[in-house]
Image: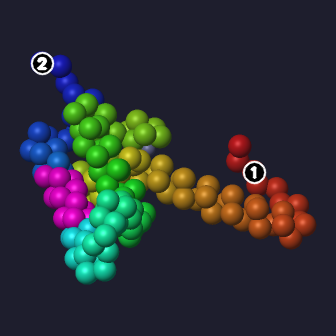
Amino acid sequence: MATRLNSHLSDKQIELLKDKLLGEAERIKNNFQQKKQEYENTSLTGAKDEVDSANDSILLAADMRFSNRESLYFKKIMKTLSKMESDQYGMCDECGDPITFSRLIARPTSEMCILCKEESEREESQNFFERRSKSLGQVMSVSGS
Ligand SMILES: [Zn+2]
């Protein structure tokens, strides 16, 4: 039997993570359904004439109300679930190192190991700092590349 790439995770652990992701996806879907329902209930009282166009705007409004963050998270969950079908799941996108189970169970959609995550966050704040200093007209030398 060939060894999986993400062999640091047992089948049981992967199963656990999958359950957690499916639970999250379900929660977001229910949330969305509920919001849509609320919209339909409130607008039924007013617009009986133009049902079709009302329906469209209900959907649109519900869609917009479904916060961007939630919908992004939902997409990420779906992406992660499909990744689970391969043995790429649980491996760092940056360096290819295994991501620890304790990190994954805390955040099953993690795509980077803790070291790379910290690194990318450092870079982000560094870019911010560089932009800032440029706008102030100062020359900063940032070494390391
Ligand atoms: Zn990494």
Which residue is labeled 2 in the image?
A: 1
Query: Contact, CB < 8 Å: mark 2 with mark 1?
Result: no
- Please tell me whether mark 2 or mark 1 is closer to you in this view: 2
In the rendered structure, the answer to whether residue 44 lies left or right of residue 54 reads: left
Q: What kind of colouring is applied to the model shown? A: rainbow
Which residue is labeled 1 in the image?
A: 143
Query: Percent x, y for residue 82?
Result: 26, 38
Query: Percent x, y for residue 33?
Result: 22, 65
| Total marks in image | 2
Query: Percent x, y for residue 68?
Result: 42, 63
Q: Report the front residue among 132 and 118.
A: 132
In the picture as drawn, the residue positioned furthest to the front comes out as 49
Q: Which residues are magenta?
A: 19-33
- Determine if the magenta segment contains residue 81: no
Q: Quadrant of the N terminus?
A: top left
Residue 40 in which image quadrant: bottom left
Q: Of the residues shown, which amino acid type is indicated by label 2?
A: Met
- In the rendered view, would you say 106 is above or below 48? above
Rounded to the nearest angstrom, the CA distance separating label 2 from label 1 is: 47 Å
Label 1: which secondary element: loop
- In the rendered view, would you say 94 is above or below 141? above
